[in-house]
Image (cartoon, rainbow, N blue to C red):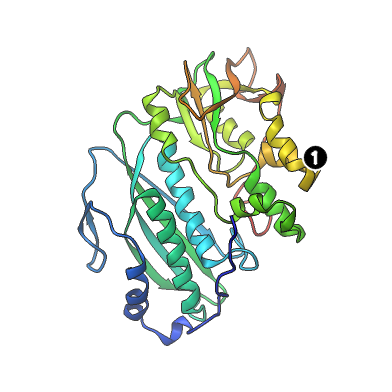
Amino acid sequence: MQLRPGPPLTGGVPLWELDEEEILARVLPLLPGSAGLVVPPGDDAAVVRTADRTIATTDTVVLGRDWLDEWSSGADVGHKVVTQNLADVAAMGGRPTGVLLTLVADPAIGLDWVLDHARGVAQACRAADVGVLGGDLSSAPAGVVMVSVTALGRLAGEPVLRSGAHPGDVVAVRGSLGLAAAGLRLLQAGTPELHPEAVARQRRPHAPLAAGPEAAEAGASAMLDISDGLLRDGGRLARASGVVLDLDPTAIAADVDALVPALGPSAARACVLGGGEEHSLLATFPGRMPGGWRRIGVVRAAGAGQTPGVLLGGRPQQSSGWDHFRPAPGGG
């Protein structure tokens, strides 16, 4: 996927030259609506029809902490923050229905960046067939740009939790492993040309949204999205379920091999095992998996004195992956 650079943060008319109504008048027409909206954005609050059980999740990204303007456009940021929220809805076995968007920005930021950001939000929402329900716009101190998205979703049945895995279940993944982390490393090294697909996945991750409710209907016992790395997120599922996930090294060998030419063996392995922002789905199944999923391991009972966690080929693994309070600058 070829991604074009967007407007710089300070490009175009600065926000301080406009009032809130003028900014929203430019932004709102870019954003998709929803058939479930009873009262659209523009009043004190939107009113939306929801299911009996509604999934709600939220994420925030901050300039300099979660993205760098040197390689992420406003549209990239919009796409990413929507995708990571919708992936959480899918990981519960639900289907997303809409999002709320908040932008907090230094008034010196340019309107061109804001509109580019809104287009990225709109593209991600339209691809998932969800609308923007409303949100908030606020100013911030110099240099601060923060974007927050709250996503809503509906459940047709019971939610799929992290705590339902049982010994004998199959461990499976839907989607890629390590691409987004590899893209981040290449951007940091100034060599994005070595793996354009990985760089594109870092800037605009892809989540297999339809696979979440499909897995729930197929009887998935536990599920979560891989936002912070296979080992870290797998460990969360294992601890919540009180089990051990024993991953098969041969099942992820192809993921590692695909990154070796660009990164070398050690870094490629680290990306596959510890790379965050992938937003693929990790699940356990007591029986047959739906199409498109691949088996990468098995759930085992934790032995006497054994701490629930992740093994690789029967060997304990040290947890690695993204941590919001111990991050590498510019990624996450």
Q: Position of residue 187 (x, y in %)?
A: 70, 58
Residue hosting label 1: 266
Q: Position of residue 278 (x, y in %)?
A: 58, 44
Location of residue 300 by image quarter: top right
Q: Is residue 332 visible?
A: no
Q: Is residue 323 left or right of residue 19?
A: right
Amino acid at circle 1: Ser
Q: Position of residue 101 (x, y in %)?
A: 39, 61
Q: Is residue 193 left or right of residue 124?
A: right
Image quadrant holding the N terminus, namely: bottom right
Q: Nearer the viewer, residue 91 or 209?
A: 209
Q: Nearer the viewer, residue 163 or 96?
A: 96
Report the residue at 67% width, 24% height from top. Answer: 311
Whether 71 is drawn above or below 202: the answer is below
Q: Is residue 24 left or right of residue 177?
A: left
Location of residue 274 by image quarter: top right
Q: Is residue 53 left or right of residue 120?
A: left
Report the residue at 55% width, 77% height from top. Answer: 142
Q: Are there few (<14), some (14-19), or many (20+) residues within 10 Å of tag 1?
A: few
Q: Is residue 169 visible?
A: yes
Report the residue at 61% width, 22% height from top. Answer: 297
